[in-house]
Image (spheres, helix red, strand yellow):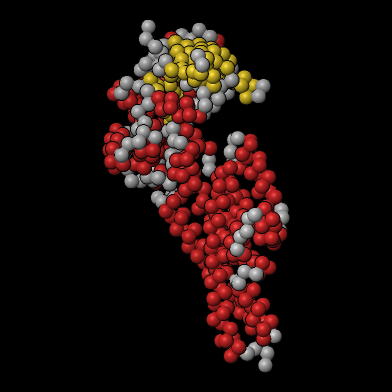
Amino acid sequence: MTTPMVKFDNVTKRYGSLTVLDSLNLEIAPNEKVAIIGPSGSGKTTVLRMLMTLERINEGVIYVDGEPMTHMQKNGKLVPADERYLRRVRGNVGMVFQHFNLFPHMSALKNCMEAPLHVLGLSRKAAAERATELLDMVGLGDKRDQYPSQLSGGQQQRVAIARALAMRPKVMLFDEVTSALDPELVGEVLNVIRKLGTEHSLTMLMVTHQMGFAREFADRVCFFYGGRIAESGKPDEIFNDPKEERTRQFLSAVLEAS
Amino acid sequence: MFWDWSYVWEIMPALLRASLVTIQATVLGFILAAVLGLVLAIMRMSKTNWISIPTAGFVEFIRSTPVLIQIFFIYFVFPEFGVVLPAMVAGVIALGLHYGSYCSEVYRAGLENIPSGQWEASIALNLSPYITFRDIIIPQAIPPVVPALGNYLVALFKETPLLSAIAVLELMQTAKILGSESFRYVEPITIVGAFFLVMSLVAAALIRRVEAYLNRTLRNPGGAR
């Protein structure tokens, strides 16, 4: 078996006395597309935030591409990673946020150039070329000199996708990326993600409320409930024939609402 | 006669020279305050307790003691420890230190107003803390606090007469000397007052222009929608 691209090994996350994730075990194969669904408070966004190292974990280890992400080797033992180690391994993962989080004082192009320039050490010319290429890919080549405040929500989110891709991550995380968008703008963002999935070899994890998209796009769907994976499987199995009562209740509530 | 114009013209050159000293003390003191304030603000926000707690203590200590005492301390007490500073240098350091701790609170407000999403995006892009501050956080944090920093610039400017207490030949000290030589205080003190009034108004107008400029170029170059 090939090394999983992402591996959660008994990962537990607590906020005070509240356990948000309870000894999570999850392996994701290279190039696999995984959709994470579940009610709010089930810990699904926390999974992405831990993988992006935005949250420290309390127990367990997360591996990316066979290398520990949350820990580092020291004298043959795994110890919690320090800032320097994190800076080295974090580049494997990229993230797109619900609220875009573009840098408002930089043009679309500059947003996409900032990290390649200062983290990867690309020349200004190379960074600009890469950014232009990616903005073209998300269909915003003509908006490269616009600032985020001049773009629609959907356009901003596409710039955010291009910005994350500019770092050439192996794993892309999408955290409810269409939840803050007006309904008519959701499609353009999903189209970009679809295109990414077919044209690039990328491992993708997405937390989403777009059940239709999860069903069509994902290789596997994980239903989170109360800090655990209550059920996971192929989209058809989960959506047509859920084994768990909780999954059934959640899906019927969500599908009724839409 | 109550007001003697010929005396005014006679003392004007000396007062103009002194006003340069006042402006110099203000500019140097404020540069120190602006830089030190930013450093203190960032140190106070540090997640490392042994950096943030002493910094907070230092800022509170400086803010809670009179600037005149700090001036005296640096000028008269430091030499006991072998640090002998010229009056002007001691005065500038004291003013810069005092207003730096005020400015640090202003910067802190600006820094804390940056949405957490900006920090998270910076981490997700693997930007170093230095680049994050330089390129992402500071350009967004400073324009909104320029008016508050400007108030401290004007306040610092108006406190420079305190330097006369350690015999820096700034405006107030010069006016006192002129007055005691001629026994006429009306003209020199009035002129000094008028000078402070005019310069404060000029400074306030400049600050408004800087604020507008920074808002245009740094914070919201695209124009709000």
Of residues A208 and B90, which is closer to you in this image? B90
Q: Is residue B58 above or below residue A235?
A: below
Query: Could you tell me which residue is drawn at 32 percent across and 21 percent down?
Result: A201
Of residues B180 and A246, which is closer to you in this image? B180
Q: Is residue A213 above or below residue B24?
A: above
Instruction: Give the left or right position of residue A143, taking residue B156 as reference.
Output: left
Query: Could you tell me which residue is drawn at 45 percent across and 13 percent down?
Result: A27
Query: In which quadrant of the rendered view does residue A21 lie?
Result: top right
Q: Is residue B146 above or below residue B118?
A: below
Residue A258 visible in this rendered orientation of the protein = no
Q: Outermost residue, bottom direction? A: B1
Q: Position of residue A176 (x, y in %)?
A: 47, 28
Of residues B126 and A198, which is closer to you in this image? B126
Query: In which quadrant of the rendered view does residue B135 lie?
Result: top left
Query: Could you tell me which residue is drawn at 60 percent across and 58 percent down?
Result: B93
Residue A138 visible in this rendered orientation of the protein = yes
Query: Could you tell me which residue is drawn at 39 percent across and 32 percent down?
Result: A164
Q: How many marks?
A: 0
Of residues B218 and B38, which is closer to you in this image? B38
Instruction: Give the left or right position of residue A132, taking residue B203 as reference.
Output: left
Q: Is residue A120 above or below residue A250?
A: below
Quadrant for the N terminus of chain A in the image: top left
Q: Position of residue B201 (x, y in %)?
A: 56, 70
Instruction: Give the left or right position of residue A185, taking residue A141 as reference.
Output: right
Q: Position of residue A47 (x, y in %)?
A: 51, 21
Q: Position of residue A77 (x, y in %)?
A: 52, 14
